[in-house]
Structure formats: C-alpha cells, structure tokens
C-alpha cells in the first residue's frame, strides 16, 4: 500500500492516533511504516508532491485557522499545505471524494511495507470509463471557497475617502501655489539683475516712505526731449473697445493680471478715476518707480505734456486730435507707444498701428498665467525708453 492510501484509510477509520513517528518513520500501528520524507501521490497546486510528513501534520491540525496553521508549520520546519489545497485534501482523506486530479501515481509507485500482519488494503482504483464521465465543473465548484462577494468588495471599513480627496486637493493646490511663486520670483530676479538699473542711476528714484522723490528737479520741456518735473505720465484710451483702460491698468501693470474693462468697471460700480498711480514692483519690499496713468489728454496742461512718457494707442487717428505734436513721427519719437491686442485676433486690426513706431503687446484671451510676461515686456521697453530720455 502506498503512503497516501494508507493515510486515507487510517483517516476514514478514525485511527489517526495509531500513526506514530519513530526514528524518521511514520508507523501506522503494526501494519505499515513509511519514511517521513517520502513523497506521496498527492500533487499540490504549485506542482510539487506533498510529503507524508506534511499530510500527517495537516490532517492532525486541519482544524486550525490557516494563519495559525502556517505559523505552526514554520515553527516546526515542516512544509505546509497551500490554502487552495486545504478543502479538497480534507475531502479526499475523509473519503468524501473518491478521487481528484491532484492524485498522480507514478507508473511504478514504490511500496514501503514493514511488519505487515494483515491483508493488503486495496489501492483505490478509478474505472477509466467512469473517469471519463467525471463532471470537472462540479469538482471545481466543490473545492471553491468564496472569499468576498460584491457587497463586501465595495465595503471599506475605517476608510474615509472624503478626507483623502480633501487632502489630495490641498496638496495639489499647494504645489501649484509654490510653482507659481517660484516662477514669479525667478522672473523678478532676472529682471532685477539684467534689465533694470537702480532708481538713482536713472535719475528717477523716489523716497522710501512716499514712493517718490520730493527733491525738485529742473523743469524739462519737450524741446530738449527730457522728462519734465514730477511723476511720469502714461496715457490710456478712454474708449471701452481697447483692452487697457483707466479701470484695469493697475492690475495689469502692477500684478501682471488682465481683467476685462467691463468686469472691472462693474467691480468699481462705474466710479471712473481721473488718475491712477502704478508702480513697478521688483520684489515684495522694493518699489523702483511710479507713474501716473490718465485717460483725458485734454485735461493736461502744457507742462504736464513734458511728463508724458508712454501712450497705449487705440489704433484710431482721432485719438491724437489736439495733441501738441505735428505728426505721428514726432509723437512716437518723444513718447513710447504700445498697442495691446489678443494674440488670436486678425492682423487686420493692427494694420494701422503697424505703420506707426509703436510696440505691439499680445496677450491670450484665456491663459491668464501668460499676462505677467506681457506686463514685464511693457515695463522693460518703457524703462529702457525712459532711461534713454533721461540721459539724452
């Protein structure tokens, strides 16, 4: 009799207590003895054959939970029965299954017989014709063990996914804020290092407390091309159809953010300012210059025109009516001109201003993060122009 059949027969008869280990052998009463390490005909789902030692230990401890059973085998140094093999192995050893695909006898299975005093117990033989009629699906279902159903899979105990979502959202917002601040600091540093000079070097420095220099300067008229006494002036159109007006100029030049004029006008409840002061900010604690922004050229006095350094053009001839200049050439030689447009607008709209000596500044209709670069371009060109006038 082979070891597996002997163990099965002993299990069915309820005589497991007769199996005794002695000197590297298992003795089945006075009938049979087999080496503990002998491989049986039962093959695991991993492909290896279970040894008699593994099967004897399992059949005597199968009542343990699988985790406890594994810990026990590890402590004893005995190979364990895999979880998928537990149920079909018990079913077979207790005789509730006549056979299983896991049993695979070798052509000449060796017999280990000692002290035989009784007749051989026949090895279970499965008739080939009957074997061909086996319902394999029934056999598979017989060894299946449901671990989770649909409901239990959807259940997540002690898990609050709302808090997970909130934490993830906060991390993403913090990352975007950090990246935005890093870009801002990098741009400010580059501009400070390579594009701008100190306020004193340009002759346009202003007091730390008031934001302007109260020291009187000699009055300069347009005839000499230098800037006149007082804070420099930037002119913007009063018409709503232009992108930059007295309403939204401060946010664009100081913060690098474009807000449509109609939106800003509603926020200000229609309160139209006569003058707006804007400052070029290099960092949080330093202001290098300040400008007055106005949109009523007709209100300027003769000496005020000496302080006009820039104009945002509408692209219409009538914008320059009654200006104290003879033509466009003289205007844009003494005043730097800017024309703002959306980058995807038709070039036809800029056809007129292309004939003038003005700088075209393009911004996106939707990508507000690009506004800062456009604002910096205005400041770069404006300060280069002011510096050239101051030293001329």
Image (spheres, rainbow, N blue to C red):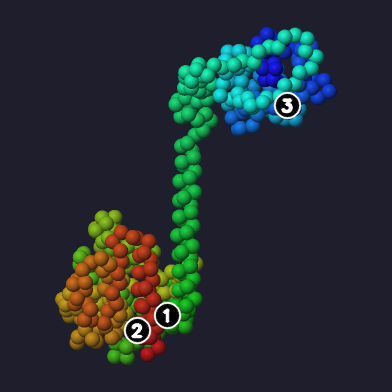
Q: Nearer the viewer, mark 2 or mark 3?
A: 3
Q: Marks 2/3: CA distance?
A: 106 Å
Q: Position of residue 208 (x, y in %)?
A: 48, 72
Residue 270 picture quarter: bottom left
User: Upstream in the sequence, badge 3 or badge 1?
Assistant: 3
Which residue is denoted by mark 2 in the rendering? 227
Q: Marks 1/2: CA distance?
A: 10 Å
Residue 38 numbered tag: 3
Q: Residue at x 56, y 24 (%)?
A: 101
Give 70 or 358, whichever is nearer the viewer. Answer: 70
Q: Position of residue 334 (x, y in %)?
A: 29, 85
The answer to whether residue 286 is left or right of residue 229 is right
Q: Residue at x 66, y 13 (%)?
A: 122
Which residue is denoted by mark 1 in the rendering? 204
Mark 2 lies on a secondary structure that is loop
Quadrant including the N terminus: top right
Q: Position of residue 259 (x, y in %)?
A: 30, 60
Residue 359's place in the image compared with 262, above or below, is below
């Amino acid at each position: 009799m082979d070891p597996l059949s002997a163990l099965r027969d002993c299990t069915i008869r309820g005589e497991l207590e007769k199996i005794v280990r002695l000197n590297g052998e298992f003795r089945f009463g006075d009938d049979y003895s087999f080496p503990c390490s002998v491989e049986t005909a039962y093959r695991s789902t991993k492909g290896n054959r279970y040894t008699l030692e593994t099967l004897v230990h399992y059949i005597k401890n199968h009542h343990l939970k699988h985790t406890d059973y594994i810990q026990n085998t590890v402590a004893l140094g005995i190979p364990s029965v895999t979880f998928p093999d537990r149920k079909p192995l018990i079913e077979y050893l207790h005789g509730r299954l006549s056979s299983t695909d896991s049993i695979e006898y070798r052509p000449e299975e060796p017999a280990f017989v000692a002290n035989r005093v009784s007749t051989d117990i026949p090895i279970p033989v499965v008739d080939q014709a009957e074997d061909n009629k086996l319902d394999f699906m029934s056999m598979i279902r017989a060894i299946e063990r449901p671990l989770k159903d649909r409901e239990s899979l959807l259940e997540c105990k002690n898990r609050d996914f709302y808090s997970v979502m909130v934490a993830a959202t906060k991390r993403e917002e913090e990352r975007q804020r950090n990246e935005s601040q890093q870009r801002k600091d990098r741009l400010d540093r580059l501009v400070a290092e390579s594009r701008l000079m100190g306020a004193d070097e340009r002759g346009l420095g202003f007091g730390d407390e008031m934001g302007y220099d109260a020291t009187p300067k000699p009055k300069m008229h347009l005839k000499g091309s230098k800037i006149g006494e007082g804070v420099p002036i930037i002119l913007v159109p009063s018409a709503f159809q232009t992108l930059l007006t007295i309403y939204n100029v401060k946010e664009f030049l100081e913060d690098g953010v474009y807000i449509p004029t109609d939106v800003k006008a509603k926020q200000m409840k229609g309160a139209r300012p006569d003058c707006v002061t804007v400052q070029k900010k290099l960092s949080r604690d330093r202001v290098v210059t300040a400008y007055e922004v106005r949109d009523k050229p007709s209100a300027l006095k003769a000496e005020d025109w000496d302080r006009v350094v820039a104009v945002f053009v509408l692209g219409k001839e009538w914008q320059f009516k009654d200006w104290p200049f003879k033509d466009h050439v003289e205007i844009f030689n003494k005043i730097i001109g800017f024309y703002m447009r959306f980058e995807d607008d038709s070039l036809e709209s800029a056809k007129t201003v292309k004939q003038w000596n003005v700088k075209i500044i393009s911004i996106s209709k939707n990508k507000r993060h690009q506004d800062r670069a456009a604002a910096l371009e205005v400041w770069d060109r404006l300060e280069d122009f002011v510096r050239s006038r101051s030293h001329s």
